[in-house]
Amino acid sequence: MVLALGFGAGCGDDSDEGGPSFDVAAACGRIVDAGCMKLVECKALSEGQAVTASLCAQARPASVEGCKAEIAHTTGTQADVDACVAGFQATACTDICGKVPADPAACKALGNDDPNASVINCAP
């Protein structure tokens, strides 16, 4: 899933049989929050404005819905969700700013195959 603000990870949709064994909405919320808070920490810019907690809160509903819709059938587990969230939290700003950041490797277990396409600019 691509956060409306820049980077993010995929999660599953438990409405289909064979879907994940965890609460998808809660998992997507945690993933979106972790990704957006990392952008805040790194002083990322969105349309020339600093990404703030308020901006994250505004973008959250659409980002969570995008996460839920992106992957129809994940075989990921709650442990994979936890690892994905931890991966965002551990990502260094030097791996984000001025680059097209890659989602944490742990997020791949949730089925996210869409690479990010936008360079993230950050304030000094």
Image (cartoon, rainbow, N blue to C red):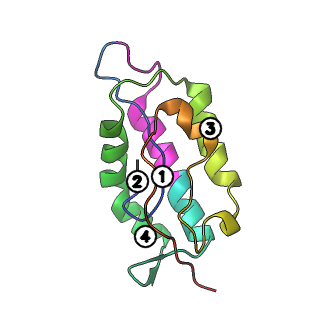
Q: Earlier in the sequence, mark 4 or mark 2?
A: 2
Q: CA distance from mark 1 to mark 3?
A: 12 Å
Is the Cβ of the residue at disc 1 closer than 8 Å to that at disc 3?
A: no
Q: Is residue 16 left or right of residue 96?
A: left
What amino acid type is highlighted by mark number 2?
A: Val
Front position among marks 1 and 4: 1
Residue to which mark 1 is pinned: 8
**Residue 31: in magenta span:** yes
* Residue nearest the viewer, comparing 51 with 102: 102
Query: What element does badge 2 sit on?
Result: loop
Task: Identify the magenta region.
Answer: 18-33
**Residue 118: in magenta span:** no
Is the Cβ of the residue at disc 2 closer than 8 Å to that at disc 1?
A: yes
| Mark 1 burial class by Cα count in 10 Å: few <14, some 14-19, many 20+ | many
Q: Is residue 48 left or right of residue 76?
A: left
Reply above or below: 27 against 92.
Answer: above
Mark identifier at residue 106: 3
Residue found 50% across the figure and 32% down from its top: 110
Reply above or below: 3 against 39.
Answer: above
Residue found 36% across the figure and 52% down from its top: 63
Residue to which mark 2 is pinned: 2
Q: Earlier in the sequence, mark 2 or mark 3?
A: 2
Q: Earlier in the sequence, mark 2 or mark 1?
A: 2
Q: Earlier in the sequence, mark 1 or mark 3?
A: 1
Q: Earlier in the sequence, mark 4 or mark 3?
A: 4
Query: What element does badge 4 sit on?
Result: helix
Query: What element does badge 1 sit on?
Result: loop
Residue 45: percent from left, percent from top = 48, 78
Quarter placement of the C terminus: bottom right
| Picture quadrant of residue 23 | top left
| Mark 2 burial class by Cα count in 10 Å: few <14, some 14-19, many 20+ | many
Residue 11: percent from left, percent from top = 44, 36
